[in-house]
Image (cartoon, helix red, strand yellow):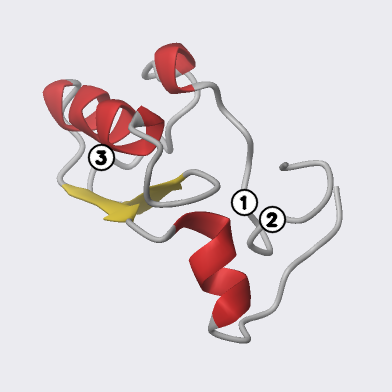
Amino acid sequence: MYEQRHVPGARWVPYDGVTADVLPQDRSATVVFYCANPRCSASPHAARTAIALGWTNVYVMPDGIFGWVAAGLPVQPG
């Protein structure tokens, strides 16, 4: 899905690949995780991992990229 379209500036990280090395150095930076749709549980899992690692501004976009597109927001191809 990421290769087809994603939020501009987003980086793809597998939900089980969230480590301090792939997150911003600033632990207060805003980090948003999303999947394809609301049925996916990977982004909440990734967000919990980031919080456990000490990041403080962690969010999940619950409707995923499908919700983003449905809202008419811009996307970027892979």
How many callouts does the rendering have?
A: 3
Q: Are marks 1 and 3 in contact (CB under 8 Å)?
A: no
Which of the numbered marks, if any, corresponds to residue 6?
2
First in sequence, mark 1 or 3: give its number. 1
Identify the element where label 1 is drawn: loop
Please tell me which residue lies in front, 53 or 13.
13
Report the side of 38 relative to 54 (left or right).
Answer: right
User: Given the image, on which type of amino acid does mark 1 rest?
Assistant: Ala
Residue farthest bottom in this picture: 72
Which of the numbered marks, if any, corresponds to residue 58?
none
Report the side of 49 relative to 29 (left or right).
Answer: left
Residue 49 coordinates in the image, percent (x, y): 24, 22
Which of the numbered marks, if any, corresponds to residue 27?
3
Q: Which quadrant is home to the N terminus? A: top right
User: Given the image, on which type of amino acid does mark 3 rest?
Assistant: Arg
Q: Residue tagged by mark 1?
A: 10
Q: Is residue 21 above or below residue 46?
A: above
Please give the name of the residue rendered at 53% of the width and 84% of the height, measured from the top-left corner. Answer: 71
In whole angstroms, how far apart are the C-alphas of marks 1 and 2? Answer: 7 Å
Please give the name of the residue rendered at 73% of the width and 69% of the height, measured from the top-left corner. Answer: 75
Q: Are marks 1 and 2 in contact (CB under 8 Å)?
A: yes
First in sequence, mark 3 or 2: give its number. 2
Residue 19 coordinates in the image, percent (x, y): 39, 16
Residue 26 coordinates in the image, percent (x, y): 33, 42
Please give the name of the residue rendered at 63% of the width and 35% of the height, measured from the top-left corner. Answer: 12
Q: Nearer the viewer, mark 1 or mark 3?
A: 1
Report the side of 9 relative to 52 (left or right).
Answer: right
Would you call the spot at circle 3 few (<14 residues within 10 Å), some (14-19), or many (20 or more)? some
User: Given the image, on which type of amino acid does mark 2 rest?
Assistant: His
Please tell me which residue lies in front, 45 or 22.
45
Would you call the spot at circle 1 few (<14 residues within 10 Å), some (14-19), or many (20 or more)? some
Q: Nearer the viewer, mark 3 or mark 2?
A: 2
